[in-house]
Each structure stands twice: as structure tokens, then as C-alpha cells.
Image: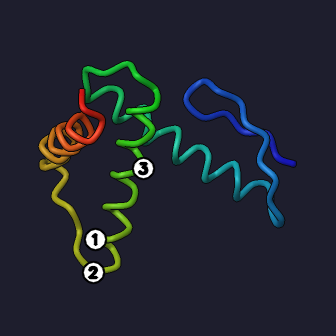
Amino acid sequence: MTQVEIFGQTYNVRAEGDSSYIHDLARFVDSRMKEVAERTATVDTTKIAILAALNISDDLHQAGKGRKDDPSNAVARAERLIRKLDDALGA
């Protein structure tokens, strides 16, 4: 069992292998959630987590295609994702 902190919450993660890898993953997710929180007006932790997951998924998908995102588009992309999330949640 490895204990990690993500966005102010402590989680016990059961995983085989190197606990330092789990800590690295948790730090990465934590940093992405903080980036989303800084760029959005929402304080809803669930929305922040979903937006961070969408951003991470987009990065992975783009990397799989061999393309890099332009960092200047990050704010516009976050705003599009917020609108999609708001529409999906009926907010």
C-alpha cells in the first residue's frame, strides 16, 4: 500500500511494483489538477479532476499520433473542455 496526496487529498493506492513510480504518477496528476484549477473559474474538485483527466488523455492521444500541442493553445483547449463538461453535466 502506497500513500499519496493529490490535490490536498490523501489516497492509499494498492499497486505492485516500485512505490516511487506511484508517487511520480500522483505528483503528475496533482500538478495537472493544479494547472487546471489555476486556469479555470471552477472550485468544484470533481470538475477539476475530470478536466485534468481529459487534458492528460488528450496529451496521450496526441503523443500517440506523434503530434505535440502548441502550449499557447492550452487555455483555449481548457475552455473548450470546460464548455463540454458543463454541457455534459447540464450546468
| Residue type marked 2 | Lys
Tell me where residue 25 appears, x and y as whole percent. 60, 53
On the image, numbered disc 2 is attached to which residue? 65
Label 2 secondary element: loop
Q: With respect to residue 84, does 8 lie above or below?
A: above
Q: With respect to residue 68, does 26 lie above or below?
A: above
Q: How is the image coloured?
A: rainbow
Label 3 secondary element: helix
Q: Which labelled disc corresponds to residue 62? A: 1
Residue appearing at x 31%, y 21% in the figure: 42
Q: Which of marks 3 and 2 is nearer the N terminus?
A: 3
Residue at far right of view: 1
Residue at far bottom of view: 65
Q: Which of marks 3 and 1 is nearer the N terminus?
A: 3
Q: How far apart are marks 1 and 2 (CA)?
A: 5 Å
Q: Are circles 1 and 2 on residues that touch, CB within 8 Å?
A: yes
Q: How crowded is mark 3: few (under 14 residues within 10 Å), some or many (20 or more)?
A: some
Residue appearing at x 27%, y 81% in the figure: 65
Residue appearing at x 45%, y 38% in the figure: 49
| Residue type marked 1 | Gln
Q: Residues within 10 Å of mark 1 (few under 14, many from 20)?
A: few
Q: Distance between the residues labelled 3 and 2?
A: 18 Å
Q: Which labelled disc corresponds to residue 53? A: 3
Residue at far front of view: 90
| Residue type marked 3 | Ala
Where residue 87 sits, quadrant-wise, is: top left
Along the line of sight, which residue is nearer the eye, 71 or 1? 1
Along the line of sight, which residue is nearer the eye, 25 or 91? 91
Along the line of sight, which residue is nearer the eye, 15 or 84? 84
Quadrant in the picture for the C terminus: top left
Q: With respect to residue 40, does 60 lie above or below?
A: below
Where residue 38 sits, quadrant-wise, is: top left
